[in-house]
Image (cartoon, helix red, strand yellow):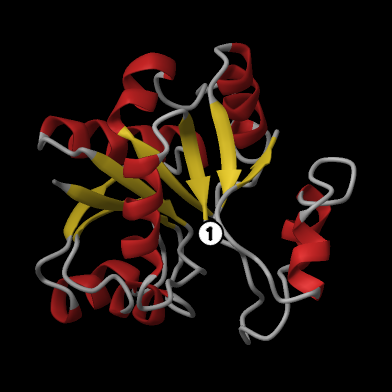
Amino acid sequence: MKIFIVIVTYNAMPWIERCLSKCCNYNVIVVDNLSTDKTLEFLKFNFPDVLVIKQKDNLGFGKANNIGISEALRRGADYILLLNQDAYLESDTLDQLIRVASENSEYGILSPIHLDGGGKRFDRNFTNYIHYDKNKDFFSDALFNRLNGIYEVPFVNAACWFLPRKTLETIGGFDPIFFHYGEDENYCQRLVYHGIKIGVV
């Protein structure tokens, strides 16, 4: 089973070391959107095994991710994790996502719970998407310490998406009309249209 992590960078120096150091031994593709800080130099000297695809322009989030996704698929990816440059994984996040995805093929996007940078609270944006009207069980289960399995939702932002190859072969990539913001909502709408589920693990 081949897993690739795709990260789009743009002036990523405040976050990229922590982000990449938590990617363990998985294959990582970085698509850089014409960073003007020291991101590229830092990657070259500190993470030489990471495949870096440099862009001549800032393509935005969706187009740049499409480049990384295409390269991962070309290299035989079974699953692709899209990860924001300012996010990082817990030690067992990918193992859990792989297990859940292999047991629940009806889900086209799986996302872990998003915590804030300190790891002690839910990320604020994440709570906007996982509210009562969209999944009545999530917060109750969190409050009573019984979070378990998958919580189906109509949308979760693309800060961390785990995508089976089948999703990308069915839906394709992000619509390039969106430069930044809206591309993930459009993508989720396309999954819902095709009857494919979206879940938070």
Viewer-closest of 64 and 167? 167
**Residue 164 in the image, given as x and y percentages of width and height:** 33, 35
In the displayed structure image, the side of residue 6 where residue 174 appears, left or right: right
User: Would residue 33 be visible to someone looking at this image?
Assistant: no
**Residue 68 in the image, given as x and y percentages of width and height:** 29, 41
Neighbours of disc 1 within 10 Å: few (<14), some (14-19), many (20+): many
Q: Choose top left, top right, bottom left or bottom right for residue 195.
A: top right
Circle 1: element type: loop
Q: Choose top left, top right, bottom left or bottom right for residue 71.
A: top left
Q: How many marks?
A: 1
In the displayed structure image, the side of residue 146 where residue 104 appears, left or right: left
**Residue 174 in the image, given as x and y percentages of width and height:** 48, 27
Q: Choose top left, top right, bottom left or bottom right for residue 79.
A: top left
Viewer-closest of 39 and 70? 70
In the displayed structure image, the side of residue 134 where residue 165 appears, left or right: left
Image quadrant for the C terminus? Answer: bottom right
Is 11 drawn above or below residue 188 in the view shown?
below
Is 41 drawn above or below residue 132 in the view shown?
below
Viewer-closest of 150 and 8? 150
Residue drawn at x 33%, y 77% is 22
Residue drawn at x 43%, y 76% is 90
- Looking at the image, the residue that sits furthest to the right is 133
In the displayed structure image, the side of residue 73 where residue 147 appears, left or right: right
Residue drawn at x 56%, y 22% is 191
**Residue 48 in the image, given as x and y percentages of width and height:** 11, 71
| Mark 1: amino acid | Pro
Instruction: Provide the residue designation for mark 1.
Output: 112
User: Would residue 95 be visible to someone looking at this image?
Assistant: yes
